[in-house]
Image: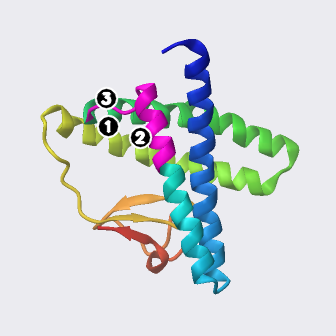
């Protein structure tokens, strides 16, 4: 792919990805405000933005087989753990931005778990096997991630009650 096209697609991918996430957040707010139709509209358009991002990612070569996708995921999580979030957290501390300090700490703690999950999954994928996992529980405040059977009564990162965790089964 030629340089200008690649740069344009990378920027479009980033923009569409960000729009997807913002619109999902907007949908949650509208739902909490008792506006189900507005929530549904935001969620629908978020899906369209996801389609656009997926198309750009495919053309950029970001989407591959599961082993390569896991390698990319491991690399991304490792970058966040070793470089990105430590720097972002220190910057937030330095500037006295307590909200940013907390959100970067939460993400840092969750990313360590995600990296390990991906490393474990890669072992199965390399043997062309699916992973063996029950329900996955996610803390809705900090993103702490744990498999079924290991869910604590309270999140060890932010102290959110187990009953509030999102369950992916």
Q: Looking at the image, which residue is at 38% across and 70% down?
A: 167
Sort mark 1 into few (<14), some (14-19) or many (20+) by Cα contacts within 10 Å.
Answer: some
Compared to 36, does 18 lie above or below?
above
Determine whether label 1 and label 2 are within 8 Å by CB. yes
Please tell me whether mark 3 or mark 2 is closer to you in this view.
3
> Which residue corresponds to mark 3?
68
Q: Could one spot residue 143 in this view of the protein? A: no
For residue 26, which quarter of the picture? bottom right
Mark 1 to mark 2 CA distance (whole Å): 6 Å
Q: Residue extending furthest right?
A: 95
Determine whether label 1 and label 3 are within 8 Å by CB. no
Compared to 39, does 100 lie above or below?
above
Q: Looking at the image, which residue is at 66% across and 48% down?
A: 104
User: Quick check: 168 left or right of 54?
Assistant: left
Q: Which mark is residue 119?
A: 1
Q: Residue extending furthest top?
A: 2
Percent from the top left, x then y, of residue 86? Answer: 65, 37
Q: Secondary structure at mark 3?
A: helix
Q: Which residues are magenta?
A: 51-65
Of the numbered discs 3 and 2, the one sitting upstream in the chain is 3
Q: Secondary structure at mark 2?
A: helix
User: Residue 54 colored magenta?
Assistant: yes
Of the numbered discs 1 and 3, the one sitting upstream in the chain is 3
User: Residue 62 colored magenta?
Assistant: yes
Q: Looking at the image, which residue is at 64% across and 87% down?
A: 34
Q: Could one spot residue 160 in this view of the protein? A: yes
> Which residue corresponds to mark 2?
115
Sort mark 3 into few (<14), some (14-19) or many (20+) by Cα contacts within 10 Å.
Answer: some
């Amino acid at each position: 792919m030629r340089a200008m096209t690649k740069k344009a697609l990378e920027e479009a991918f980033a923009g569409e990805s960000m729009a997807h996430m913002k619109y999902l957040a907007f949908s949650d707010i509208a739902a909490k405000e008792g506006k189900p139709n507005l929530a549904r509209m935001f969620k629908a358009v978020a899906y369209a933005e996801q389609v656009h991002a997926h198309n750009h990612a495919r053309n950029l070569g970001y989407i591959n087989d599961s082993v390569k996708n896991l390698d990319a995921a491991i690399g991304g999580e490792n970058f966040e753990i070793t470089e990105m979030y430590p720097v972002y957290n220190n910057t937030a501390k330095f500037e006295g931005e307590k909200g940013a300090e907390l959100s970067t700490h939460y993400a840092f703690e969750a990313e360590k778990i995600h990296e390990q999950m991906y490393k474990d999954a890669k072992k199965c994928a390399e043997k062309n096997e699916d992973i063996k996992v029950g329900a996955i529980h996610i803390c809705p405040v900090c993103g702490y991630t744990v498999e079924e059977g290991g869910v604590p009564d309270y999140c060890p990162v932010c102290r959110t009650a187990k009953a509030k965790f999102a369950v992916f089964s």
